[in-house]
Image (cartoon, helix red, strand yellow):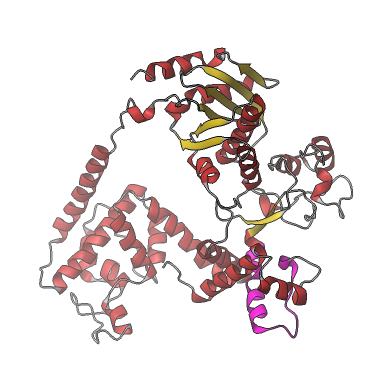
Amino acid sequence: MGFCDLRTFNLAMLAKQGWRLMQQKDSLLYKCFSTRYFPRSHFLDAVESPNCSFVWRSIMAAIPILKAGCCWRVGDGTSIKILTDKWIPKHPTNKVLFSAGVDVGEWLVADLIEPDSHCWKHDLIMNTFHREDAKAICRIPLSRRRVDDSIIWLHNKNGRYSVKSGYYVARQVLRSENWAECSKGNDEQQVWKALWKMNVPNKIKIFGWRACQGILPTRLNLAKRKIIAETFCPICLQSPENEMHVIWECPVAQDVWAGSRIKLQKCPLGQPDMVQLFLYLLHRLEPEDMALFLVQAWMLWSQRNSVLHGGKLKEPGWLNKRDVEWLEEFAQVQDQLDVLQPRATVGNVWRPPAHPFFKMNFDAAIFNDSGRSGFGAVIRNELGEVMAALSAIGPSVSSSDEAETLACRKAMEFAVDAGFNELIIEGDSINVIKALSSSSPDLSVVGNVVADIKCLISGLRRVSFSWVNRDCNRVAHALAKFANSLEEDLYWMEDAPPVALDALFLDSISMNI
């Protein structure tokens, strides 16, 4: 299952119950707990009381995990304290970092939002907070409607807690509480990152991971499980057989390493385990040599298994030659598989909608140089004729998914204002299309924007969503890129945008394929 620490796993499971309490406030369990343990505060602010039940004490043990991984998603801002709560996603600590220019100790986030237009009070924020904090606040997307503040989980894109993500947060929390274990944890992280990036087959990566974890079926490990009684190496019969012995310390392995192309002759034998050996070699070998080391280690293990089942030992020179040839063969196969896919296929061209539908394509572009984004949308009929189009300026965003979601909302507002009631909506962001097609509430950072789009859609007669690749979305993309040169939004009604004529021409050609 991938869970190495049972205590941490149990805490992650308990945190799941705490997450359910926060999300299911109508449940009987939440009402009982809230009445007794936190009648006038939020669940995350609750504490363990002297006479509390065993269940509540267990849930409180997982509260640090939820506090570390949860964050407020701004709705109307009436439940969020500016200075003490975590409410700024993708910002260090998710809180205000620098002291404000005025006393905001009792302020709520609602004090920073225009109540009528549901947008940030930009001038107030820029004059009150440090520039970095102000920019991060203004990047938070707000709903067009009045919605409640909610708690989201930062370590999943969908904003929902999972035991897997909670497990890793719990490990970080426990590691920060026990600094003595930090060094080993950091060493392991370096090893895992280097291991999974190696240009070797996945089965060899998994072999390296199992060797570093100490879970290969060596004689010592099998004896610990009472499967066999003999623990000595079946090849040299001199020492107990563990991972380090098979791969590094056995005389047979030493003969192979002595003749290897890798410069390992001066490497010491006193490494305590495979993680430390791997880390030692990482600091001294090039990535290509590390890949060769891992392949040779796998061959030594394979030879050990072969001898154990009646095979014969290979010459060290043959093994050293074979590992180089094996890596070269793997590289050649990878090059052969890396073939460009043909672009001119029927599925890669724009198609007009069937009557009486109109098709709306939307797209977004991010302009890092100017610190803003751009939105583009075009609505066409069954003949491919442009009925409406827009190129609009967007705010600074923190991710492409956020930009695409905001672009879709802008496009939907434009389509509703223009009077279109039967739409096929196409975009090239699979995450946005999935979110809009889902019937469950979206708890992500942009979930309120997704809810705005669904609210707009509910007023249409018929609507459907479809994901397309970039080639089918070139007109909207051209309009989104053009927004970087604008000072105000541009709209076209029953007229082809001049900036997208080339893209429209290519789409018209594809209609006849």
Nearest the camera: 49 or 344? 344
Give the side of residue 315 with respect to residue 41, left or right: left
The structure residue drawn at horizontal position 18% and vertical position 48%, both measured from the top left corner, is 325
Residue at far right of view = 103
The structure residue drawn at horizontal position 40% and vertical position 72%, both measured from the top left corner, is 272
Give the side of residue 488 with respect to residue 298, left or right: right
Q: Is residue 167 above or below residue 341?
A: below
Nearest the camera: 461 or 303? 461
Q: Is residue 179 visible?
A: no
What is the x, y in percent for residue 393?
66, 26
Nearest the camera: 421 or 71? 421
Nearest the camera: 287 or 93? 93
Can residue 293 be found in the magenta stretch?
no
What is the x, y in percent for residue 75?
73, 49
Point out the image quarter for the C terminus.
Answer: top left
Q: Is residue 67 above or below residue 230?
A: above
What is the x, y in percent for residue 366?
59, 31
The structure residue drawn at horizontal position 73% and vertical position 52%, both measured from the top left corner, is 148
The structure residue drawn at horizontal position 44% and vertical position 55%, both measured from the top left corner, is 193
What is the x, y in percent for residue 296?
25, 58
Q: Is residue 421 visible?
A: yes
Q: Which residues are magenta?
A: 43-67
Point out the image quarter for the N terminus.
Answer: bottom left
Can residue 44 be found in the magenta stretch?
yes
